[in-house]
Every structure is written in C-alpha cells, then in structure tokens.
Amino acid sequence: MSLIRQVWLVVLATVVLAFAGSFAVTIVSARHYVQTQLRVKNSDNAAALALSLSQQGGDWGLMELLVAAQFDTGHYQEVSLHGVDGRSVQRQMPSVPMYAPAWFVRLVPLVSEPGVAQVSDGWRAIGTVRVVSHAAYAYRDLWRATLQAGVWLAAVGVLAGLAGHVMVAGIRRPLRSTVRQAQALVDGRYLTVEEPKVPELRRLTQAMNAMVQRVRQAFEEQARQVEVLRRQASCDALTGLWQRQHFLRALELMLERDDAAPYGALVLVRMLDLAGLNARLGRRRTDELIVAVAQAMQAWGQDVADAGAGRLNGSDLAVMLPNRQVRSEEMQSWSQALRRLCEAAGQGAAVALACTGWQRGQTLSEVLVRADEGLAHAEASGPFGWHLQVHDGPLVMVGGQGAWKHALDEALAHRRVRLGRFPLRDAKGGLVHWECPLRLQLVASGPFEPAASWLPLALRTLSTSAVDLCAVDEALREIRSDGRPRGVNVAAASLQAPGFVVGLRDRLDAAAAAAQSLWLDLPETAAWLHPELVRDLAQRLKGTGVRLGLEHAGEYLARIERLYEMGLDFIKIDARFTRGVASQPEQAQFVRSTVVLAHGLGLSVFAEGVARAEDLAVLWDCGVDGATGPAVES
C-alpha cells in the first residue's frame, strides 16, 4: 500500500472515529437530558395534581373529574389516583404513534419514571396520585436533536476531510516531484526540483538534488574528456581542422552514402614554398598565417550543411562543400581574401587555389586526382593563382523544380516507395533491427531512387515531413507483416514542420503493437542545433515503445546541450570514427570513451559503416552494442 494511501486511511479513520465518538456522546447526553426532563416533569405534575386534589375536601367525585381533566390535557401515558380505602381512578392511553424511527427507539430507549405524590385532607390521608408522561414526544425532540447534531458533525467532518486533503496534497506534491526525479534518473535524465516546505521532505529533496548535481558535473566532465579525445583523434593540433584521414573518410562517405548530398565541390589551398616561408618568417609567424588561412577557409562552409575543412598535410588545406557549385566569382573573391592575409604576413607568403566538383557515386581517388590536377594548374599560374574545373551540377528534371515537386508528390500519393534493408547486428550476430532507408520511384516504372536524388528537393520544398511519415507508414506495415524490427530516418527539418509530431504519434497509436519494434534515427545535428525539439519529440513519443536515437554521431555529441535530459535510447557513431579504428589508437580511445559516456546515460551505442573485420573486432572490444556495414552483412 502506498504511503499516500496510508496517510489517507489515517485521516479518514480519524475523521470517522471523531464523528462516531462525537455523535455517540451527543446522543447519550441528549438522552440523559430528555430522560431527566421527563422525570422532573412527572414529579412536578404529580405534585401539582395532588395539591389540587387535596383541596376538594375528600369529595371523590370531584377528584375523579380532576384526574380525568388532567389526563385529557395530553402528553400522558397514565394518570391514576389510588385511595386508602381501596377506591381508585385510572386513566391510560393504550398507544401513541412514535415520532422517531423504530430502530432509533430500540437503540435509544427512554424510561419515563412515574411521578408520585400524596393526597390528603388536612391531617387525613386520602390516597396516592401517580403521573406517567408519554415518551413519544420525548423521542420526537430527541430525534430532531440527533438529526441536527448529525448534520453539524457531518459538516465538521467534511471540513476536516478537506483539511486532510490539503494536507495530503501538500505531502503528495513533493513526493511526486521526488518520484519524477528518481524516474528521470532511471531514464537517463537529470532533473532538479523545488525544495518543499516540509522539513523531512526538504532534506530528501536536497539530497536528491545534490546527487543529480554531482551526476551532471560528472557527465559534463566526462563529456569534456570525450571532446578532447575527439579532437585528438580527428583534428589537427595547430589549425583545429580535420586531420587528413578524418577528412578523407568524411569525403569518401559523402560519395558513398544514400542519404548524402548528390553533388558538391572540393576546394584545395596550398601554401607555396612552405619550407622557405618557415625560414623567412620563423615557425611561430608561419603557424599564425596557416591558422588564419584555415579560419578563412572554415568561413567558406559555415552556411553549408555537412561542410567540413581539413588539413591534408603541412601545406595543403581543403574544404568540401556538399550541394554547392562554386562560381568563378567566388574563386576570385577567395583568392583576394587569402592574398590580403599573406601580404599582411609579408616575406613572399602566397597560396594557390583549386576547386573541383564531385557527384555521389564517384570514387575518392577520382575526385582527389582531379583536385590535384586543378591545383597543379593553379600553381602554374603563379602566386594566388586559382583554377576552377567545370563539373556537373545536380540532375534537373524537365520542367525544373516544379516538375521535381510534382514527381515527389505523385510518388508519395501512389505509394511508389520501397524500404532498403541493411542489418544492424549485435556482437553475437543477432539482428537488432533492419536499417531501412527510403527509396522513391519518382517516375512511374522507373528506378527507385535513394535519398541523395530527392532529399535536397524535399528540403527546399518543405516536403520532408510527408516523406518521413510515409517511411514510418511503410516500416509499420512491414513490421506487421513479419514482426522484425526496423529503423527509419527522420530529417531534422521534419521536427519543425507543423503537424509532424502529431501525425507521427497518431500513426504509432494506431499501430501500437508494431510501434514496439520501430526505431527512429535523427541526425546528430538535429540534437545539436534544436535540442528542445528533440527533447519535445522524445516526451511525446514516450509510452509508444518507439526507440529514438541519433545517427552519424560523434562530431557534436559531447557538445549537445543537456544530452542527459534528451530522452534518447541509442546513438550510432558515424563511420568517420569507426573506419580504420584498428590502426588508429586515438580513434579507438575516442570510441571507447563515447561508449562509456553513452552507457552511463543508459543509451545503447552502435557503430555505422564498419567495412573491415579487424575494425569490427576492435569496436566490440570498445563495448559497442551493435554495428552496421559490410563487415556484418557477410
């Protein structure tokens, strides 16, 4: 039995006992009072009647008349006169209706004690008069008094119950807050609650808040350590840009992934004659110039989703710009900006720039070869020379964006959709769930296109919410068909679309059993840029059985605001951090620390895009709960 219920029972029992006791005492007191009044009345009436009879000079006829007259006044059960000579006069009322319920008469008996007085004529005794009042009228008064007392005591009981309710509510609120705080800890969320006024509960709340604060501090410290390890594993110590291997892995994944940008640009910048520049400027000033150039290059992609900058070697820096076509005007502007930086440094500092385009499906070596060729042309042009290679942009359907939008809407309306199927397995080879990227048949009888072909259009036309709801519908349908768990992607833009979360919850409620096997993947950037939206989504999906997590995680994970209160179930570490982990100890240490951090929050951790068996073995050793990629598909 709960504490609140026990308190309620104590309050209720106290009120009931107080009511019953007060009621019983009231009835007993009233009965005693009424019975006393009957006795006094009988005695007084008997004495008054005896006095009247004594004044009749012993005339028995007159005395008989007086007895009859006294009885006829009512309220008497018996009036009698017994003479010393054996004569008597007696008047009795056989029955009088009671003015109280029969059960009340049985429970509260009243005894009307007779009043007796002597009748005399001077010194001569005539007889004895006996008067007994009827109890029916006393019962009437006693019943009325009992009802009034019951009403008043009930009113007092109600007020006492309300006071008890207020008291219990005052205890329940801080208890609920404490329970909610404890449940949040179980769910991996760390909440502090307002301290109650009740001293005992205040001490409990203070202890819980202190524990939550310590856990938060421990998490934040661990997150800072993870961030340090991430920078050591993936970033250049001088510029803060990605290291060569990390940058190349990110570019390679951009070329391979179904959900990556369909095209983009790669910009290379080379510091000319770096060895001579070091000799002329000195190491410190040369490093300052490289840092300034790196910061300028990072600014080129600050408004480009999934852009990244890296340092390929001592003199070469690169920026990848997904979904971007670079124009000659931009190349000219970038070259002039870098010229100003170099001229400020002096001593003949100079750079060369080259830009080449890429499209999804090309190999990394193809893109790098074209970029190197372009950089050779730029160097041949002299200091601050630049070269822009003409490259194909996005495929454009006849009719332009309107035709794309129409094709997208038609594909969704006619359910020309298909889910891919890639396994995510645990260390024992068991299936955790199927990874199911959505494919759309934009042209009837045509191929089913991956997200790279239509996602940019869906983003521009604000159609991602419809696409994601369609993917959820298809996943729930397939789960109902074979009972196997499935995971689908949800775009960050969908969280901001009106009605998306409501529509998602309606679908999950309508397919409650299938929803237990559904996994939803949000991009890590959604939690980094819009933490409140992700937190709200997790709260709204609570109770449906759906598992919510982050994909392509690692770059911003330790910097997500209040990750411990996000309400997530899992994270998937991006392939940039899992590929080559067997040969990169710093990378393995970052993965291991990320796993410890996530497990401390109650999150499962999965590795994405694992291609080699040796990498997979190291990842199992790091403690990941599952993995995807060619290494687990075979």
Image (spheres, helix red, strand yellow):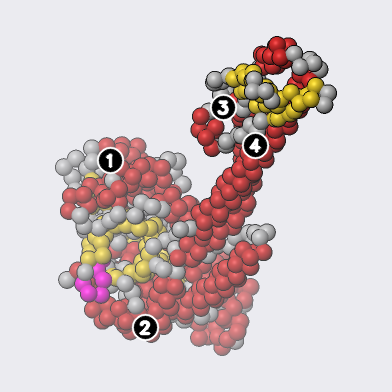
Determine the image quadrant of residue 396. top left
- Magenta stretch, residue numbers: 424-429
Q: Is residue 287 left or right of residue 518?
A: right
Q: CA distance from mark 2 to mark 4?
A: 97 Å
Q: Is residue 4 left or right of residue 443?
A: right
Q: Earlier in the sequence, mark 3 or mark 2?
A: 3
Q: CA distance from mark 1 to mark 3?
A: 80 Å
Outermost residue on the bottom side: it is 279
Determine the image quadrant of residue 499. top left
The answer to whether 485 is drawn above or below residue 234 in the figure is above
Mark linked to residue 31: 4
Residue in front for this viewpoint, 6 or 102: 102
Q: Earlier in the sequence, mark 4 or mark 1?
A: 4
Q: CA distance from mark 4 to mark 1?
A: 86 Å
Tell me the residue that label 3 is attached to.
100
Mark linked to residue 584: 2
Mark linked to residue 412: 1
Q: Is residue 315 left or right of residue 447?
A: right
Q: Amino acid at mark 4?
A: Arg
Q: CA distance from mark 1 to mark 2?
A: 44 Å
Residue in front for this viewpoint, 256 or 216: 216
Q: Label 2, secondary structure: give it.
A: loop
Residue in front for this viewpoint, 424 or 396: 424
Q: Amino acid at mark 2?
A: Gln
Q: Label 1, secondary structure: give it.
A: helix
Q: Is residue 615 visible?
A: no
Q: Label 3, secondary structure: give it.
A: loop
